[in-house]
Image (cartoon, coloured by chain):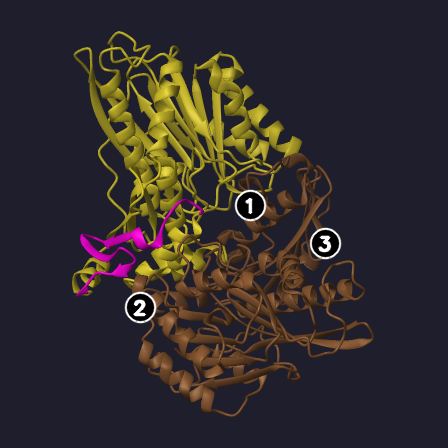
Chain colours: A yellow, B brown
Amino acid sequence: MTTAISPLATPFPDMPMIAGVTPHVGRARYKSWDRNDLTFIRFEAGTAVAGVTTQSKCPSPEVEWCQAHLSGGAARALVVSAGNANAFTGHKGRAAVEAITAKAAAHLGCGVEHIFVSATGVIGVPLPIEKAEAGMDDAMAAAPCGWADVAAAISTTDTFPKGAMTQAVIGGKTVTLVGVIKGSGMIAPDMATMLGYIFTDAALAPGLLQQMVLAANKTSFSCITVDSDTSTSDTVLAFATGKAGHAPLTSMDDAGADAFQAALSDLCRQLAHLVVRDGEGATKFIEITVDGAVSDASAHRIALSIANSPLVKTAIAGEDANWGRVVMAVGKAGEPAERDLLAIRFGTTQVAENGLPVEGYDETPVAAHLKGSDIQIGVNIGLGHGRATVWTCDLTHGYISINADYRS
Amino acid sequence: MTTAISPLATPFPDMPMIAGVTPHVGRARYKSWDRNDLTFIRFEAGTAVAGVTTQSKCPSPEVEWCQAHLSGGAARALVVSAGNANAFTGHKGRAAVEAITAKAAAHLGCGVEHIFVSATGVIGVPLPIEKAEAGMDDAMAAAPCGWADVAAAISTTDTFPKGAMTQAVIGGKTVTLVGVIKGSGMIAPDMATMLGYIFTDAALAPGLLQQMVLAANKTSFSCITVDSDTSTSDTVLAFATGKAGHAPLTSMDDAGADAFQAALSDLCRQLAHLVVRDGEGATKFIEITVDGAVSDASAHRIALSIANSPLVKTAIAGEDANWGRVVMAVGKAGEPAERDLLAIRFGTTQVAENGLPVEGYDETPVAAHLKGSDIQIGVNIGLGHGRATVWTCDLTHGYISINADYRS
C-alpha cells in the first residue's frame, strides 16, 4: 500500500544511542516488500525491563510471552516482526515465538526468559518460522543501526517513523530516554496501545521501572484513540541499562525518581501524540479536556466518549463547530452529567453555558480555530473537580480508503 | 442536503388506517425547505400509550416531557417536529414544549398530560415557537393523510420513508399494528433509538402495553447500531386505541396477549431493520450473531463490540473477509472469551475454529457472500449458552460525506 505521509507528521528527532543498547534491523520479507521488517535489539546484562500490554481477551502469543516474563524484570534482547501480527494463530503462533526466543537466546548465551518479542500486521496468519529466522540472521549480521531505522522497521501502515527523546538528572548524572513507536489504526486506549519501546541508560530496579511505566501510561497511551478499536498485540516495553553510572533507583522516595518519572511521562506523552498524528486518514490533531466531572475516572470516560464519537470526529473533519454533537457524546457516556450545567468551548471560545448557546455567540473565532490542524475542545460538566485530557484525530475519507482495502 | 436513496431501501408498504387514529401533516418550515415537517396525530379518547426513550444524560425537553407523562398511560395527540431537535436548549426549549402541548390540548379540549411530543434535527437551537404554532395550524387545518406522508414528514437525513405493519388475532378479532420510524445516523442502542411510533386498534391496559414495548425493544431497537452514537432525542411510543372491539388485555396471562406480543416484537424488529437499511452511507446490511457466550448479556455486548468496530465495518464495505478484525473486536469487548475456543463464520462458511484458520480454508464462497448486500457474521465463543443477534451496516465514504458537512 502506498499512502501519503500524514499532514500532521513531524520530523524524526536527532536521537542519541543509549549505552548498553545495540539495535540492528534486517529483512524477514514477511510480505512481498523490499524493506527491513525484523528488528533485533541487544541489551547488555543488567538491563531492567518493564511494560504494559493489551487487555484484549484475544492477545497474540507475543503478548502472552511478554506478560509471562515481565515479572522477571531482566532483558537481553527485543525482537520485533512487522507485517504479520501472529495473532489468533493458536499453537502455530506459539511455536513461532518459541523458535524466535530460542534462536535469540542461543545467539546471546542467555535464558529465553530474557528475550522479549512483538509482532504487528495482519491477524490470523501464523508467523512463518523460516522467514523469522532468516530475518534474525540478516539483522544479527548487520551493523548496528540508528533509531530512525528501528522506527521504520517496526512500522506497518504508519506513514512516518516516530520517535522522541528526553533527559533527566539523577544523582548529578544526566540520563537519556529515547523511544520509538508504531501505530496508526486499531488504536484505542486499554492500558496500552500499539507497539512502543523506550530505552534509557538510567539505573532502576525493575519493580520501580514497572511502577513508573504504569504511571506514565495512565496519562499517555491510555489517553489516545484513533478509532476505538483495541489491538490484539499492543505492547509498550521500557528497558533501562543502568549505564549512566548513578546509584540505582529502587523507590519513588529516592532522589531523582521524581525527575525520572516526569521525563518518562513526558516521553510517553510525546510518543502517544505521534501515534495520533499518524492516525489513519487524520487531518486534525484533537485535544479534548473535560473538567468538573464527579471524578477523574468519570472525566476520562466522558472525554473518550467524545473522542470516539464518529459524529464529533466527522464534524471536526468538516471544520464544523457542531457542538451539539459534543453534547450528544457527553450524554451517551453514561456518566453523571446535567445538561443545564454543561459548558463547552472550542479553542478559547466559549460556545455554550448552562444548557444554552452563549448570548451573542459569534462563530467567527471558532471557525478560524477549526481551520487549523490542532483543535481543542473543552467541556465543563459543572458537578465536581474531576479532570481528564485525551487526544484523538478526525475521521475522514482517508480512514475509509485505508481500511476498506487493507488486507487484500 | 440532497442524498441518494439508500441502496438498501425497501418500498413503503401498503398500510391501513387504524380506527381511532387520525394523522395530519403540515409545514412549520423549521428549515428553508418546502416540505411537511410538522406531524399532528389525533387519538380518540381511551387510547393507551407506552414507550421508551433515550438513556442519554442530556435528553431533549421533548424526551423529558414524554418521560414525565408516560406513566399516565393515556394519549390524545402526538406532535412531531422535524429539522430541529430542540435539544440542549435549556429554558427556551422547555418553553417551546409547553407552547406546543398547550396549543394541542386547547384544540382537543384535553389536559396537556395527554399530548406527546418529539423533535429531531440539529441540536442546540431552541425550537422557534412561532414556527411550531404555524405548523400546527397548517396541520390541524389539513385533511387527514396516509402513513407514507407521516413517515416522510418526520424524516430528516433519512433517504427513504420507513413503515411496517403486522396483524394479530385477539379474542377472535383481528387487530392491526402499523409503525413509522425515522433514523439514519446517531443510531446506537440504549433502550431506544431514533423516533418510532406504533399505532394499533388493539385494546390494552397501559401498564401491559408498556411491559410489551419494553420486551419488544429488547430484541429490536436495542439490537441495532449505525455509528455507536446515541441521540439526545430517541423515542419510541406505542398507541393503542382499543377500537378493534375485543375485551381489553390487562395481563400477559390473557388469551391473545402472547399473539400481540409476538406481533409487536415482529413489527419493532421490522422497523429497527429499516433504520439500519437507511444507515448513513450504508451499502451492506449486516447481521451479527454471537453464540456460546457465558450469558445472553455477554453475547449482546460482544456482538455490539463487533457491530461498532470501524475496522470490521470498513472491511465489510471493502468486501474483505478480514475475520482477524472480528477476533480483535471480540477481544476488546471486555467479556469472557478464549482465543483458542473461538469459531467464526461469514455467511454459512466456517473460516476459523479453535484459534486457527480452518484447514484448507477456501475463501471463494466467503468472497461471494460478501459481494451481496445482506451479510451474516457468526461467532461462537465456546464457553456457554449465551446468545444474541444485532444488526448494523457498513462504514463507507458515504458516512463521511454526509457527516463532515451536515449542519453547515
**Which residue position is annotated with label 3?**
B349
Mark 3 to mark 1: distance in Å?
19 Å
Q: Chain of mark 3?
A: B
Judging from the image, mark 2 belongs to the subunit labelled B
Q: Position of residue B345 (x, y in %)?
A: 69, 51
Which of the two marks, 3 or 2, is nearer to us in this view?
2
Graded by Cα atoms within 10 Å as few (under 14), some (14 to 19) or many (20 or more), the crowding at tag 3 reads some
In three-dimensional space, the C-alpha distance between marks 1 and 2, rounded to whole angstroms, equals: 37 Å
Q: Is residue A232 above or below residue A242?
A: below
Residue corresponding to mark 1 = B329
Dot 1: chain letter: B
Q: Where residue B239 appears, x then y in whole percent?
A: 60, 71
Q: On the image, which quarter does residue A59 sit in? A: top right
The residue segment tinted magenta is: A334-362
Q: Amino acid at mark 1?
A: Ala
Image quadrant where residue B124 sits: bottom left
| Residue wearing tag 2 | B125
> What amino acid type is highlighted by mark number 2?
Val
Above or below, B141 against A189 in this view is below
